[in-house]
Amino acid sequence: MTPRSFWAIVIKILGIYIILDSLTGIPAFLYTLFSFKAMVNATGTIEIVLFQIGYYLIVIVVYGFMCWLCLFKTNWLINKLKLDQGYQDEHFDFTMHRSNILKIAVMVIGGLMLTNSFPWLCKYTFGYFEQIDQYKRFKDSPQAALIICYFLQTIIGYFLLTCSRMVVNYIELKRKTPTAIPPED
């Protein structure tokens, strides 16, 4: 394994972790969106609510950009940060293939995601059914957005655990496909 491939693996694992970390902020964003009207009525001003929504949108864009850089522009990032320079040895003695390391990382992140979101899903679902007589529709419940978000996080975590090879193949797709060479005139 070369220093370049080592750093590519580390950066891609970081990108996957950024995706996991960004999903934890989605319930707060959706709660702000769904309770927009109630928050405006409670505060009396729309500026505070718009500031919160703008803040969450900026955070989502920054996280998305960082994830895109880490997963799909890995070589560019390694070149700009000069991570593969300054090593005495050009090869590390490490016999595991990079796709296997990425698969393990995806499975660990999926497991973390599943174990973090499933208890919250159970808690909010149970809380909803305790108060089901107070709300005529599911969307009227203040816990509806949280239930949906934690349900999606649980499904994504389960998907990452069970379909890790497909996720790794998607991440590695750009590296495996050769770039087209334009014809010479």
Image (cartoon, rainbow, N blue to C red):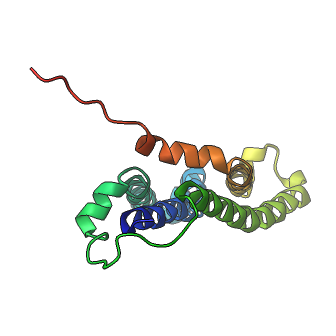
Q: Position of residue 176 (x, y in %)?
A: 44, 41
Q: How many marks?
A: 0
Q: Is residue 111 left or right of residue 184?
A: right
Q: Position of residue 65 (x, y in %)?
A: 37, 55
Q: Nearer the viewer, residue 15 or 10?
A: 10
Residue drawn at (36%, 36%) of the image: 178
Q: Is residue 124 left or right of residue 49?
A: right
Q: Please, is residue 139 above or below residue 20 in the view?
A: above
Q: Nearer the viewer, residue 142 or 126?
A: 126
Q: Position of residue 107 (x, y in %)?
A: 68, 59
Q: Is residue 4 left or right of residue 146?
A: left
Q: Quadrant of residue 137?
A: top right
Q: Nearer the viewer, residue 133 or 88?
A: 88
Q: Is residue 82 left or right of residue 11?
A: left
Q: Nearer the viewer, residue 106 or 47?
A: 106
Residue drawn at (61%, 57%) of the image: 100
Q: Quadrant of the C terminus?
A: top left
Q: Quadrant of residue 47?
A: bottom left
Q: Quadrant of the N terminus?
A: bottom left
Q: Position of residue 76 (x, y in %)?
A: 29, 56
Query: Outermost residue, left direction?
Result: 185
Q: Quadrant of residue 66?
A: bottom left
Residue drawn at (26%, 78%) of the image: 86
